[in-house]
Image (tube, grey):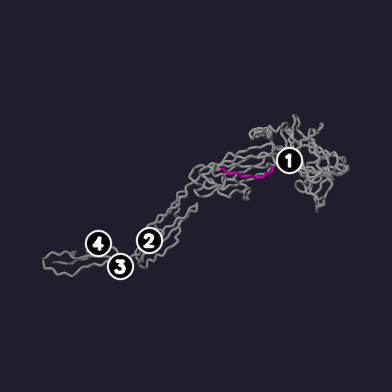
Amino acid sequence: MLIKKIGAVSTALVVLAGASVPSYAAEQVNPASYATKAETKLKNNALKSEVESPIKLVNGSFEEPQIARSNAMFDASEVPGWKTTATDNTIELQRNYNNFWGMDAADGEQWAELNATMNSALYQDIETTPGTKIRWKVSHRGRDGVDTAEVRFGSPNQSLELMATMASGNKDWTEYQGTYTIPEGQTVTRFEFQAISTADGDLTRGNYLDNIVFSSPSNLVVTDSYDKTSTPKGKQAKYNVNIANNGGMQAGDINLEIPLPATLKYVPSSVTINGTTTSDVTYNDATHTLSVHVNQIADGTTTTVGIGVEGLTETNAAHMSTSLEYHDLGFTDATYTANSTGANIAVTSNTAPVIAADDVTVKKGASFDPMTGVTASDTEDGNLTSSISVTANDVDTSVEGTYHVTYSVTDSDGNTTTKTITVTVSSNNAPVITASDKTVKKGASFDPMAGVTASDTEDGDVTGNITVTANDVNV
């Protein structure tokens, strides 16, 4: 049996608390057993004995059934989880309606008054696995002064073992807690609070109870993944860590350690917890390690920590994994660890697409299609020709001159390339043949091409292209 007192010097099982009293439980542990962090973690392996399903009581903060005003009396059958030894089978619940009681619940909105109509006990019978370590805690408070009650565990058919005697004043809630190992053969355990006395001797009032825990320890399971399979250099991705609490109670003071590979860098101020940005983060530039703190994770829930990373260098597998340490909420005697298997992301090149387009000369009056012969390609996306857009085009083929066409294309990574070509519109005048009339002697030779030339504004000398289409000369 381990019973722990928080923030007090005394190790006695009975503590009188006439005024505000620190959180309490009795200490029966040799401090030397916690001499080193490593020893503590080894001890935790025994504390967190695996069970098929978590052990925990029902309605530990007496939030059911809800009451409309300051208090209500119920038959025990109407209060989920709880039973009573009171002969009238009555359980009383209270809440600070319109500040009637001048105090708040230790947890939630409601609490129970153990001395509802008489000196009696509240209890639950819970299925348990022998050998399992159980965490327990309870908040206790007197009504008119110092009220006293006992915490007892054991088999419902046998005498219960006294775990702690609670003696608490009415100025504040006092928390009692400890650790209990289910004995051999005890498959059902009674978790009981027995009223002993009240400050004014009236056994029909007093001994407030709230925030009760009787459960197997918290058990965090860590999985991780990226939000995409690859990211280009200079672009961001999200690394997500899912932390599921499969245990029987809340986990607290969860500290994540996440080393980053050289191929990725941490994006500052990018860490979120369940979608909300957190500043409870430390990044060590020297070791490229990110530390994230999560206050608590309730049993049966999953918390997601998201971290922004940016690709630095190309790789097929940038690996990240997470290790974490945590406690059972409200207990500091044991530190647990959990690790993810890790996740990989590829960092790809981030080259801009390439547009292939050449300068063009067209004849005046000719048709002009700016996309003829123009293509685009990208290392990651392949052929992007269909994605090309013409962003500027001042070509007028009706007027000779020099014009320009500008093209643009964007790849899937957001890289945009532009290219401008020159379009020359040239004249389209007919060629000129230079030839003179000739006189030759009868019987002399005659060459119809002698002294004949042709020229063109665009093509220059085209004499070689001249053909004689008719010749009736007879010398």
User: The N terminus lies in which quarter of the figure?
Assistant: top right
Q: Amino acid at mark 1?
A: Gly
- Res. 62 visible in picture: yes
| Discs 2, 4 touching: Cβ within 8 Å | no
| Discs 3, 2 touching: Cβ within 8 Å | no
The label nearer to you, 2 versus 1, is 1
The label nearer to you, 3 versus 1, is 1
- Res. 78 visible in picture: no
Disc 3 to disc 1, C-alpha distance: 104 Å
Q: Position of residue 334 (x, y in %)?
A: 68, 36
The mark found on residue 113 in the picture is none
Q: Farthest residue in the top direction? A: 184
Q: Amino acid at mark 4?
A: Asn
Please state if 319 lies on the left or on the right of 75 as rendered.
Answer: left
Q: Amino acid at mark 3?
A: Asn
Disc 2 to disc 1, C-alpha distance: 83 Å
Return the disc, 3 or 2, that comes first in the chain's sequence: 2
Q: Amino acid at mark 2?
A: Thr
Disc 4 to disc 3, C-alpha distance: 16 Å
Q: Position of residue 353 (x, y in %)?
A: 45, 52
Return the disc, 2 or 1, that comes first in the chain's sequence: 1
User: The C terminus lies in which quarter of the figure?
Assistant: bottom left
Query: Badge 2 is on which residue?
Result: 422
The label nearer to you, 4 versus 1, is 1
**Callout 4: helix, strand or loop?**
helix
The mark found on residue 429 in the picture is 3
Q: Main secondary structure of the magenta part?
A: strand
Which segment is the magenta one?
Answer: 289-299
- Among the 4 quarters of the image, the one containing residue 207: top right
The label nearer to you, 4 versus 3, is 3
Q: Farthest residue in the right direction? A: 202
The mark found on residue 465 in the picture is 4
